[in-house]
Amino acid sequence: MVDSAAEDALAQAADAILAARHVAALTGAGLSVESGIPPFRGPGGLWTKHGEPPLNGFEEFLRDPKAAWQARLNPVGPMRELWKTLSKAAPNPGHRAFVDLEEMGLLRHLITQNVDDLHRAAGSAQLAEIHGNYTLVRCLSCGVRRHRDEISLDELPPICDACGGIVKSDTVSFGEPIPADVLETCQQIGSECDCMIVAGTSATVYPAAYFPLEVRERGGTLIEVNPHESELTPLCTISLRGPAGEILPDLVRQLRARRSN
Ligand code: APR
């Protein structure tokens, strides 16, 4: 049950979404907390517990791709914890609420920083995975992506059978440029959006955190969905304080009610 102030904020968010021309969403690790995947920062965060990882992951991969693949296939420490939860996770009501908004024609695009495949598994179609997807691999030369089960790991690193380039996990490592195709899609979304739902992100990692700033600078509306304040809170038009798995279905219910009146 939400209190009256929260109810008002929810109503305000529903009105803003219905009044907008191009609604997009930016999601982060908080969306998947209710699927059993720990976030990185804030309460229970992996980096909160183990410290932020080194920012030279991509440089290390390029220095010795074989060793990087071996480490990836035999993860230790926080990454082992993360990969274990990823393989068991399923979409939660927060992911499904975004699919509802898309099917209602109220959400044009979703940019996610999550690599856990849960938005795709929930059925989001207009999806840009800016940090990649852990179920995919990508050739560093030609950019072709394949499902990780489609490549042989007999030889490491795997070699692209289309161009002979080195194949890496599609998840973007620290220090790795965002692949040009997905970056261009996200930049296009950021330039067209006049109302962005920012859910489950600390909004501290760029370029993803740049898109809501761009929307705000153009006078657009930012709707935050987060149980805690984030760096973005002061810029948000509306802050819906609570877990995405509860708030977003409530928002969908408000929108359906407005639609049926
Ligand atoms: N519902 C909504 N938000 C939640 C929930 C929840 N149930 N639980 C936690 N949160 C919020 C936290 O308050 C925090 O603001 O989700 C946010 C998670 O922040 P981070 O852990 O920093 O995740 P994210 O913003 O996605 O990190 C960005 O950093 O390490 C890199 O590549 C990694 O994509 C990741 C990027």
Image: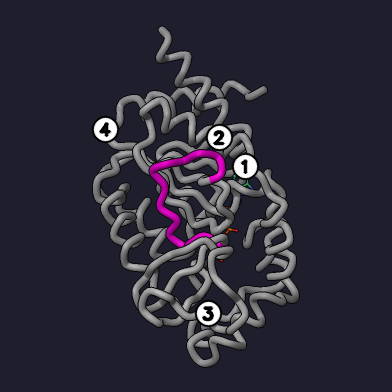
Element assignment for label 2: helix
User: Identity of the amino acid at label 2?
Assistant: Arg
Q: Which residue is mark 3?
A: 158
**67 up-or-down from 183: above or below:** below
In the rendered image, residue 256, in percent from the top left (x then y), is placed at: 46, 17
Q: Is residue 28 above or below residue 257?
A: below
Residue furthest toward the bottom?
Answer: 63
Assign the magenta stretch its main secondary structure.
loop
Report the disc number at residue 91: 1
Crowd tier of the residue under label 4, counting other residues whose Cα lies within 10 Å: few below 14, some 14–19, many 20 or above: some
| Residue at left offset 41%, top offset 25% | 104
Q: Please give the count of numbered marks on the rendered protein.
A: 4
Tell me which segment is drawn in magenta. 121-134
Q: Earlier in the sequence, mark 1 or mark 2?
A: 1
Comes first in the chain, label 3 or label 4: 4
- Number of residues whose C-alpha sits closer than 10 Å to that of mark 3, classed few (under 14), some (14–19) or many (20 or more): many
Relative side of 198 to 246, left or right: left
- The crowding category of the residue bearing disc 1, from other C-alpha atoms within 10 Å (few below 14, some 14 to 19, many at least 20), is many
Q: Secondary structure at mark 1?
A: loop
Task: State how far apart marks 3 and 1 are (Cα).
Answer: 30 Å
Q: Quadrant of the N terminus?
A: top right
Task: Nearest to the eye among marks 2 and 3: give it.
Answer: 3
Pointer 3 residue Cβ closer than 8 Å to ligand 1: no
Q: Do the numbered discs 1 and 2 sit on residues whose CB atoms are within 8 Å? A: yes
Residue position for label 4: 21
